Amino acid sequence: MDTSAWTRVISNASVASSAGTAPYGLFSPGAVGIADGRIAWAGSDADLPVHLRCPVEDAKGALLTPGLIDCHTHLVWAGSRHRDFEQRLAGASYAEIAKAGGGIASTVKATRNASEDELLALAMKRASRLIAEGVTTIEIKSGYGLDLANELKLLRVARAVGERLPVTVRTTLLAAHAVPPEYQGRADDYIRYVCDEILPAVANAGLADAVDAFCETIAFTPAQVERVFTCARELGLAVKLHAEQLSNQHGAALAARHGALSADHLEHVDEAGVRAMAASGTVAVLLPAAFYFLRETRLPPIKLLRRHGVPIAIASDLNPGTAPIASLLLNLNMACTLFKLTPEEAFAGVTRHAAAALGLGAERGTIEAGKIADLVLWDAGHPAELAAQYGMARPVKILRSGEDPS
């Protein structure tokens, strides 16, 4: 092999590549060669060329993984939802809190009143917590502006997070998150506004990589979501959906019909929805923190998803009201303890399947030649430790495109 362009090598690592047929894609002792910000080679230490011109770093048996990917967050917001928490503990439901003026509406008010600089400062603090856990790619949704000026503001802030911090950001327009106060009782009119004004403006500005919607009894009907998706696809934008979180609105099947990258939550999805997702290649994104925080009891149908071969991703759903938990690693643990995923499934869920949920599977999510060299070296020896020992396995080195972030 030609190693003349290699810039660095990490050797003597326990490499969990999240690729191949071995559990976790694990090979040890293993090595990774890096050139031009990408993985040039990955394999056994025994096959590593003897004479190399670049530095060779001894991992001393430590775990090396792809950079983790948090494929569902709402981390740009202002205000606090502690009152929601108190009300929920007193017995109020998600819908009751929303109808009383809490929930998304209260965050929209605070976020509209916040400046771009204020929102960026808050978002960077939250993103930094995820990055410290080895997250190198984050999806950030809008959805707390709910009008053109403020949705654009949130998307600009999300993009700025990726410019200021060592993390790749994918932005998602979630204007169809809730009906804003000025459109109360006129959801169809609001959806018309989303399709006629917000979506074209966002697409023209190049600020969104995808479009999301909340298909639920307290949000938007399948017919309304269909209009949003049709418009998004006409504008060349990928789609994804908050589906079947609180009830079965057949959103998963709707998402699959539009070739959605992912359908997220899915506690109430039925077999028809799972079959549709399997046929379309739509990733199931499970959100344990929201399940935990809302004290839900209906589990996503993990066995159905497995049976039909639907890829399962795990994400933090970081948001102010129903998943205010800035830790993807804690979600790994909860995916196993609450949803009964195996540690190997959970690991795939924050690497290769999370990459697929963002349309990034060709570039990220595994340690394979040709992929971007976003890598994490851990103070751990086995990938199961990331899920099994929360707060104990921590990154000791994080590479972004093969470099140590400055």
Image: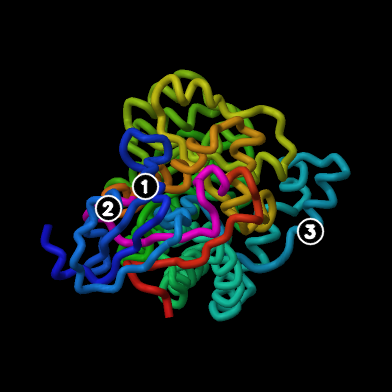
Label 2 with label 1: CB-CB less than 8 Å = yes
Where is residue 364 shown, x and y percent of the image? 33, 53
Where is residue 88 shown, x and y percent of the image? 81, 45
Tag 3 secondary structure:
helix
User: In the displayed structure, does residue 309 sit left or right of residue 49?
Assistant: right
- Neighbor class of circle 3 (other Cα within 10 Å; few <14, some 14-19, many 20+) is few
Instruction: Write the residue at 34% across / 63% down.
Output: 10
Q: Pick the residue in front: 79 or 349.
A: 349
Report the Cα–Cα distance between label 1 and label 3: 40 Å
Residue under pointer 1: 17
Residue 373 lies in what quarter of the image?
bottom left
Where is residue 393 shown, x and y percent of the image? 59, 55
Instruction: Write the residue at 59% across / 39% down.
Output: 335
Dominant SS in magenta: loop
Q: Nearer the viewer, mark 2 or mark 3?
A: 2
Where is residue 70 shown, x and y percent of the image? 49, 53
Q: Pick the residue in front: 67 or 74.
A: 67
- Neighbor class of circle 1 (other Cα within 10 Å; few <14, some 14-19, many 20+) is many
In the displayed structure, would residue 123 be above or below residue 226?
Answer: below
Q: Return the disc, 2 or 1, that comes first in the chain's sequence.
A: 1
Is residue 343 visible in the rendered structure shown here? yes
Residue under pointer 2: 42
Q: Amino acid at mark 3?
A: His
- The answer to whether residue 383 is magenta is yes
Q: Amino acid at mark 2?
A: Ala
Tag 2 secondary structure:
strand
Instruction: Write the residue at 82% across / 41% down.
Output: 92
Q: Which residues are magenta?
A: 367-386
Q: Return the disc, 1 or 3, that comes first in the chain's sequence.
A: 1
